[in-house]
Image (cartoon, coloured by chain):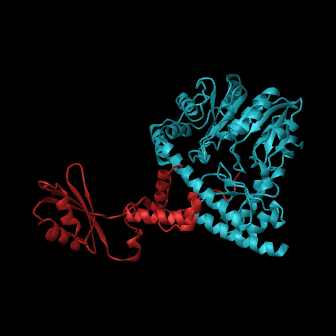
Amino acid sequence: MRNFLNRKVCEMPPSGIRRFFNLASEMQDVLSLGVGEPDFMTPWPVREQAIYTLQKGQTVYTANAGLLALRRELSAYLADKYQLEYDPQKQIVITVGGSEAIDLALRAMVEPGDEVLLPEPSFVSYKPCAEMAGARVVTVPLHEEHKFRLRADDLRKAITDRTKILVFPFPGNPTGSTMHKEDMEEICRLVIEKDLFVISDEIYAELTYDGRHDSIAAMPGMKERTLVINGFSKTFSMTGWRLGYAAGPADLIAQMTKIHQFAIMCAPTTSQYAAIEALRSCDRYVDEMREEYARRRRYVVTRLWEIGLPCSDPQGAFYVFPSIKSTGMRSEEFCQKLLTEQKVAVVPGDAFGASGEGFVRISYAYSLARLQEALNRIEIFVKEHGREST
Amino acid sequence: MNMEDKTRELLEVLEKNSRTDIKDLAVMLDENEADIAAQMTQLEKDKVIFGYHTMINWDKVMVDRVTALIEVRVTPQRGDGFDNIAQRIYQFDEVSAVYLMSGAFDLTVIVEGRTMKEVALFVAQRLAPIDQVLSTSTHFVLKRYKDHGVVLEEDEKDERMLVSP
């Protein structure tokens, strides 16, 4: 029989997280700090609204781009939060999570051989999606000494005649780093000078601490060359609802909607109705969650420094990305030993790209009690292994 | 963040868990321990914090305890309205809370006792005979689902996968 499998897909390495997940799930009583989703439940008004629409039987397809009522709410929301004006009819498409929007955007823009710039360490989906679309991915390392912020110098070095797109993921997973206006000015100048397009993944925008999120699309001259991707998963604790969106230039949204129409038809209807409720009535919940995350963040960062695992102070998302270089171990080794010896799961930094080596990702989407216990165990672990290496 | 926000946040954290360690409070609120301790002392002095209670599910330890909510209609008094009559009621040790209400009755009185009979007798012998009390209506709590923001029988299982991107 012929080999029916696509070679490109077969050659794609599985996610580094997957491997570690398999290891962790074989063990009992693991204390995990390894998740990339909120520990808060979806606010009850949102769940209640979803139940209500199910009872009413609102279970049919929506428009391909999503319910117009939802796009209208989003249009108002983006204007209010980030000073971004988008036409709900032509410039917004509702997707199955932010992930689908990433895939659609890359497929709608990349021609074979185009180069896509990807800051690393970063979320695991960009690279495979870009490569599946035919792009050559060029990574731009983010440095700890610059708080994992993207620097124009590093970006400039990576640009060639074939560069077309910059993926711009801030606040970032796994680093928690953010980019404010003053950090983006030089980058925007460079992007405009080199005529690049920006895919700005702002899924963690509402989880920004000590200040508000600035969208790169709101920078002068950037709106027409930026696609903003966001979603409901992190902001409203709605991961399982699978609902995201993209907002950007009408011609790009039209092409993305075309692919979406043929591949997906429309995002889940129940989730879309729930999302309208989230936008309308859940500001209070988001504020409370943000404050709670901020307190845990300070706790985790302080403890990690005390333990001897230095980390830059993350300004966004719900991750801390400490350096484990002082232990003399590689990320993978550190995480495996921590798991087997102390039954604590954290994610090796290199799962987010080679430049994540020497770091681990710790999520603080957990109760304070859980964080305390897990950090106590990490402290014991680091003490024991510190002695070995001296 | 201004001072008022800081105080509000401190109070919100303490309201959820008054046993939070001062050292942890200081770290989480980005202040030093001495300031947090001083602030708490002041809040206690000002009676902003007017007590620290422990939420106990007595049903789980087989201790007999019943709670009743009593709707009380009273005649307000010239000069001091409801305050005097409220005071006459809240002085009883059996009474754990008294609230002045809007609507169809005047005072909500929460009474705790060991048995329904004990509570009923308290109402009949102590509460109802007070001159200004026009009527009482006693409702016993049969089951507590949620108290002070906490769902009593909630299973706190983490449904999330151990590791996810």
Residue drawn at the location 60% of the way across and 27% of the way down: A85
The image quadrant where one finds the N terminus of chain A is: top right
Q: Nearer the viewer, residue A118 or A307?
A: A307
Residue A98 pos. (x, y %): 66, 40
A51, above or below A165, in the image: below
Residue B148 found in image quarter: bottom left
The answer to whether residue A333 is left or right of residue A314 is right
A133, above or below A368, in the image: above
B162, above or below A198, in the image: below
Residue A257 found in image quarter: top right
Q: Nearer the viewer, residue A79 or A189?
A: A189
Q: Nearer the viewer, residue A341 or A79?
A: A79
The image quadrant where one finds the C terminus of chain A is: bottom right
Q: Nearer the viewer, residue B114 or A383?
A: A383
The answer to whether residue A99 is left or right of residue B141 is right
Query: Is residue B34 in view from this perspective?
Result: yes
Chain shown red: that is B
Query: How many circles with numbers are drawn on the protein?
Result: 0
Residue A13 pos. (x, y %): 83, 49
Residue A283 pos. (x, y %): 50, 42
Residue drawn at the location 15% of the way across and 68% of the way down: B124
Chain shown cyan: that is A
Residue drawn at the location 80% of the way across and 49% of the way down: A143
